[in-house]
Image: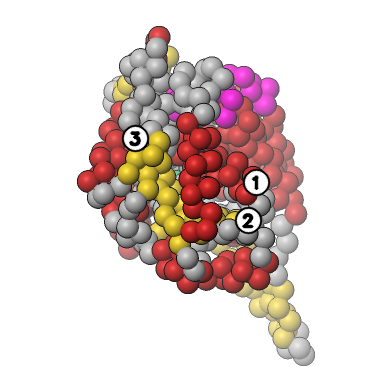
């Protein structure tokens, strides 16, 4: 049995209280490792280590900080197979997906911010005949990064890399459901000799470790990705303490398909945007709106392709792996039942899948397609975050905009049309922080990333992340 450890002050250490939680392989339903069940004492030790490291790290030349961050990227690359296997085992995602997306992206995140910090410039504002202002950006100090289970190392590194690059010391908490690759990351940080206390990784439960991070007086900023309800809890604690907050929250993303789209490109991408990572990507399009004139054609081809997706043991060559946990599996199945109660017709999937062999106790759900629901029923309003999509026909742009904007969320939208004017009109009016036209998940790490409405506050990515993790000071000099 593997016992994971916390990474505090440059050392791999046991949790203060000596307690552990079980870590389950969701494709088999069996325990494969034990995770520190840390508490406020572990957080306190990490804060002390981070405070001790803060001044030296903030004052280290940015090229030297960048060199450490690049060394982390190389350290992950050198152990690529191990990271890929760990991510798939912990999360249930197909090994091929972890190899194609998750781990390469974690490497890119570190590499991107190691480079970005060397390109950062600052603003100046001249006051003709009087003086000049310049903006001085300094690290915030000790910051917390809290991330979810769906893209474990991908999202963990997306926060840690800019926080470190800008000269902050970090206390990071992965989801206790998928802690394995963040543990491997702490081994890499030790291997490359990252200075002590600069990065601390604490494992454990959100309501214990996450709560202690939100409440700690010395932690001045929190970058959080997770559910909207958790974001609300963190904000209610941290906002009155005037902590800087970046909240990347839930979504219920529309995928809007006009009859004039490139059908082949659209349908291929729509299968992916519906079911990649078992639909557990915050950017997956779960409400598919199709212009009525191509609705039947779309439905027939889509269902045919969905039925052809292979599902099963993530270590084999499959399209769809396991759902991340039993609790989440139960939640998704309960939403499928709700959809039926609300009058939905299941036209593909709609039930659990039981593979043969040693994955028979795993948490698998067939990719599910539902039609016949009202645009504003609960199934179409609440985040399911699984392999479940609904199909709804529409007649006009005005109507589909109303459907698309009807939820409390505003994270991402895909729009499929070859009509350029319509694409721009829709992009302007749709209530989403991220809009893809004729594509999905095409990411440029320099662009602002985040949601509006209840999908979040603030933006990550590129300069936005470097700005979030720094305090801006205006320095005014009179001639
Ligand atoms: P949660 O909100 O349950 O958890 C996210 C993180 O917060 C975990 O590390 C969790 O710890 C921790 N946490 C839980 N409770 C608290 C608390 N009281 N105080 C501080 N931290 C806490 O989300 P999930 O892990 O279930 O992730 C799925 C959600 O994430 C979905 O809603 C999805 O849409 C959203 N998401 C948003 C993205 C975006 O960019 N907008 C991207 C990816 C996902 P633990 O797991 O250990 O309990």
Q: Which mark is residue 38?
A: none
Q: Is residue 313 visible?
A: yes
Instruction: Establish if 123 lies above or below 283.
Output: below
Is residue 173 positioned above or below 119 on the image? above
What distance separates the C-alpha of mark 2 from that of mark 1?
8 Å
Residue 275 image point, x, y percent:
49, 38
Residue highlighted by disc 2: 261
Determine contact: label 3, label 2, CB under 8 Å.
no
Whether pointer 3 and pointer 1 mark residues with C-beta atoms closer than 8 Å, the reply is no
Q: Quadrant of ligand 1?
A: top left
Q: Residues within 10 Å of mark 1 (few under 14, many from 20)?
A: few
Q: Is residue 465 above or below residue 356?
A: below
Q: Residue furthest left?
A: 341
- Who comes first in sequence, dot 3 or dot 2? 2
- At horizontal 47% and vertical 65% (from top left) the residue drawn is 395
The answer to whether marks 2 and 1 mark residues whose Cβ atoms lie closer than 8 Å is yes
Q: CA distance from mark 3 to mark 1?
A: 26 Å
Instruction: Residue 290 in the image: state x and y as whole percent.
Output: 49, 55
Pick the residue in front: 152 or 305.
305
Q: Which residue is mark 1?
A: 265
Secondary structure of the residue carrying numbered label 3: loop
Q: In the displayed structure, does residue 5 sit left or right of residue 424?
A: left
Magenta stretch mostly in which secondary structure? Answer: helix
Q: Is residue 134 left or right of residue 348?
A: right
Was residue 336 drawn as part of the magenta stretch in this picture?
A: no
Locate the N terminus by quadrant. top left
Q: Pointer 3: what residue?
A: 350
The image's colouring method is: secondary structure
Residue 273 placed where, x, y %?
Answer: 53, 44
Residue appearing at x 36%, y 24% in the figure: 353
Q: Quadrant of residue 394?
A: bottom left
């Amino acid at each position: 049995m593997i016992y994971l450890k916390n990474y505090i002050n440059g050392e791999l250490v046991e949790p203060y209280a000596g307690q552990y939680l079980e870590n389950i392989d969701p494709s088999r339903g069996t325990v494969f490792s034990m995770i520190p069940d840390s508490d406020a004492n572990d957080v306190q030790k990490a804060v002390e280590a981070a405070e001790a490291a803060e001044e030296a790290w903030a004052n280290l030349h940015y090229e030297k900080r960048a060199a450490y961050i690049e060394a982390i990227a190389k350290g992950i690359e050198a152990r690529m197979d191990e990271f890929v296997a760990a991510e798939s085992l912990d999360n249930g995602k197909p090994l091929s997906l972890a190899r194609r997306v998750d781990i390469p992206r974690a490497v890119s995140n570190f590499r991107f911010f190691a480079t970005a910090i060397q390109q950062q410039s600052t603003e100046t504002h001249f006051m003709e005949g009087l003086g000049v202002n310049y903006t001085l950006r300094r690290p915030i100090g000790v910051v917390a990064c809290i991330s979810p289970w769906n893209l474990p190392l991908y999202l963990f590194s997306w926060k840690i890399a800019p926080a470190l690059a800008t000269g902050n010391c970090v206390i990071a908490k992965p989801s206790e459901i998928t802690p394995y690759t963040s543990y491997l990351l702490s081994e890499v940080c030790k291997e490359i000799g990252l200075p002590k206390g600069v990065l601390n990784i604490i494992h454990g439960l959100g309501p214990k470790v996450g709560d202690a991070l939100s409440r700690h007086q010395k932690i001045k900023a929190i970058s959080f990705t997770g559910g909207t309800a958790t974001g609300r809890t963190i904000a209610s604690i941290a906002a009155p303490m005037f902590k800087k907050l970046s909240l990347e929250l839930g979504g219920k993303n529309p995928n809007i398909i006009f009859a004039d789209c490139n059908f082949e490109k659209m349908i291929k991408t729509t299968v992916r945007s519906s079911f990649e990572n078992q639909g557990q990507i915050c950017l997956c399009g779960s409400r598919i709106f199709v212009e009525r004139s191509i609705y039947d054609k779309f439905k027939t081809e889509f269902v045919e392709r969905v039925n052809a997706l292979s599902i099963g043991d993530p270590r084999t060559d499959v399209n769809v792996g396991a759902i991340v946990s039993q609790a989440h599996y139960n939640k998704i199945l309960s939403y499928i039942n709700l959809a039926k109660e609300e009058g939905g017709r299941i036209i593909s999937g709609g039930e659990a899948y039981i593979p043969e062999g040693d994955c028979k106790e795993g948490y698998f759900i067939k990719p599910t397609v539902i039609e016949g629901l009202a645009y504003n029923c609960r199934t179409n309003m609440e985040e399911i975050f699984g392999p479940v999509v609904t199909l709804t026909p529409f007649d006009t742009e005005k109507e589909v905009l109303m459907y698309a904007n009807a939820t409390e969320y505003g994270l991402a939208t895909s729009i499929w049309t070859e009509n350029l004017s319509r694409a721009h009109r829709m992009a302007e009016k749709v209530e989403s922080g991220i809009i893809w036209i004729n594509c999905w998940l095409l990411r440029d790490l320099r662009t602002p990333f985040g949601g509006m409405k209840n999908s979040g506050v603030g933006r990550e990515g590129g300069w936005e992340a470097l700005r979030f993790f720094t305090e801006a000071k205006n320095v005014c000099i009179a001639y």
